[in-house]
Amino acid sequence: QSVLTQPPSASGTPGQRVTISCSGSSSNIGSNYVDWYQQLPGTAPTLLIYRNDQRPSGVPDRFSGSKSGTSASLAISGLRSEDEADYYCAAWDDSLSGPVFGGGTKLTVL
Amino acid sequence: QMQLQESGPGLVKPSETLSLTCTVSGASISSSSYYWGWIRQPPGKGLEWIATVYYSGSTYYSPSLKSRVTISVDTSKNQFSLKLSSVTAADAAVYYCARGRKYCSSGTCLLDYFDYWGQGTLVTVSS
């Protein structure tokens, strides 16, 4: 059971906009930044979004993040086949004094 | 270009101790801006933070694993290591080492995000 809650799956067709939600509590998302990681099949996770809505160098602006209260969202616009991956949200948890992850959302591009 | 590389046995017997090392290249592990951590992923499951270390030797552990985990840093070798004792089948996973950005606010510092990850090493627990 992950501390942060994500839907297990999401899907969309090429060109569509897809959003993935991440729900937490006041001790994590509610009081700290949210990050998102992309894990392509068979590879290590990579940082996709940090501090709620910041993109590392090299991440396309098709990817965007937002946060409101104790929830966060990752949006992917102009969906492409290469976006098919697992996506994880993460945040620092004040109660656990460490980072916590969501259970991951498997994105399928139909 | 910064790289992290995990190394260690891929097979550990139940009740024994899992030992892994992460070698950092392209950056100094002694930077005051970063933590260094271990994260694991059981087959087909999600990510779980295990532990984090600062170059000074300060350590931080997941409460659920704290009693069995030791993380350490060797600045002379630009490496950090993980030991997990009394392993069971539940500890079988891909183990990743990663660099964590340090963020400080109002006198409190925490791990902001993991910006670089190793490729991961699969550890199997079996007799």
Image: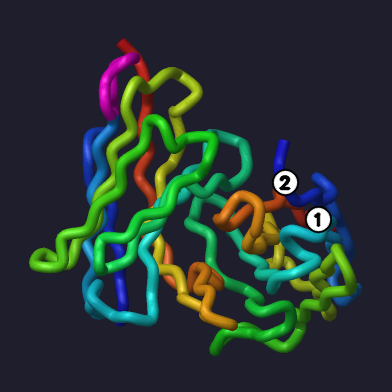
Mark 1 is on which residue type? Gly
* Residue A53 % position (x, y): 73, 82
What residue would you read off at disc 2?
Answer: A3
Which of the marked residues, 1 or 2, is nearer the chain's N terminus? Answer: 2
Instruction: Check if mark 1 and mark 2 are on a common chain.
Output: yes
What residue would you read off at disc 1?
Answer: A24
| Nearest to the observer: residue A103 or residue B75 | B75
Give me the residue at 37% from left, 26% from top. Answer: B124
Q: Is residue A30 visible?
A: yes
Q: Is residue B119 visible?
A: no
Mark 2 is on which residue type? Val
| Nearest to the observer: residue B59 or residue B81 | B59
**Which mark identifies residue B1?**
none
Is B86 above or below relative to B127?
Answer: below
Q: Main secondary structure of the magenta part?
A: loop
Q: How many marks?
A: 2
* Chain identity of mark 1: A
* Residue A49 % position (x, y): 66, 76
User: Is A18 on the left or on the right of A3, as rendered?
Assistant: right
Check if mark 1's residue and mark 2's residue have beta carbons within 8 Å: yes
* Residue A62 % position (x, y): 76, 83
Identify the element where label 2 is drawn.
loop
Give me the residue at 88% from left, 70% from top. Answer: A69
Q: Which residues are magenta?
A: B11-17
Identify the element where label 1 is drawn.
loop
